[in-house]
Image (cartoon, grey):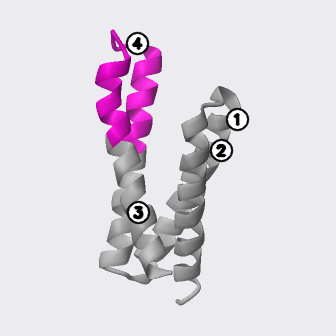
């Protein structure tokens, strides 16, 4: 489970960074849609860093905060895919679901 957890955390960081970089190439101007896309990339990046923190410096607080953030992030991505219906969103749902299950399992150790 540890390798899967590390892989999911790394993929969340990669998706977040990719979304931030892609904003520059996919939008001609910084309108509302581009700002939301960019902001979602930063949110995914932050979520990836939280997961990395939980793996690197585990404590009861980091485990609980990360599990809560993963649940909220998963809910947000599910809602976004339901509204926008982009194929890559389903991949993000899968990765966040793995990270959420891993963080909840990690929480149960406390």
Q: Magenta region: which residues? A: 18-43
Q: Is residue 41 above or below residue 91?
A: above
Helix, strand, or loop for circle 4?
loop
Helix, strand, or loop for circle 3?
helix
Q: Is residue 47 visible?
A: no
Quick check: marks 1 and 3 in contact, CB under 8 Å? no
Nearer to me, 79 or 85: 85
Give left or right: position of 36 versus 75: left
Nearer to me, 81 or 75: 81
Please provide percent x and percent y for residue 54. 38, 73
Instruction: Decide whether the magenta segment is chiefly helix, strand or loop.
Output: helix
> 10 Å neighbourhood of mark 3: few (<14), some, or many (≥20)?
many
Q: Is residue 67 above or below residue 81?
A: below
Disc 1 marks which residue? 82
**Residue 38 drawn in magenta:** yes
The numbered mark at residue 78 is 2
> 10 Å neighbourhood of mark 1: few (<14), some, or many (≥20)?
few
N-terminal of the pair, mark 3 or mark 4, is 3
Disc 4 marks which residue? 31
Q: Is residue 1 visible?
A: yes
Q: Is residue 9 above or below residue 44?
A: below
Quick check: marks 2 and 1 in contact, CB under 8 Å? yes
What is the distance, in whole Å, between disc 3 and disc 4 at their CAs? 30 Å
Give the image quarter of residue 68: bottom right
Disc 3 marks which residue? 9
What is the distance, in whole Å, between disc 1 and disc 4 at their CAs? 22 Å
N-terminal of the pair, mark 2 or mark 3, is 3
Give left or right: position of 80 versus 35: right
N-terminal of the pair, mark 1 or mark 4, is 4
**Residue 4 drawn in magenta:** no
């Amino acid at each position: 489970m540890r390798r899967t957890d590390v892989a999911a955390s790394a993929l969340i960081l990669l998706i977040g960074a990719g979304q931030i970089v892609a904003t520059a190439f996919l939008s001609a101007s910084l309108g509302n849609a581009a700002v939301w896309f960019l902001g979602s990339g930063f949110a995914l990046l932050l979520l990836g860093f939280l997961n990395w923190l939980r793996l690197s410096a585990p404590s009861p607080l980091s485990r609980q905060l990360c599990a809560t953030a993963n649940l909220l992030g998963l809910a947000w991505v599910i809602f976004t895919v339901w509204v926008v219906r982009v194929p890559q969103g389903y991949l993000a749902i899968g990765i966040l679901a793995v990270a959420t299950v891993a963080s909840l399992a990690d929480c149960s150790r406390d």
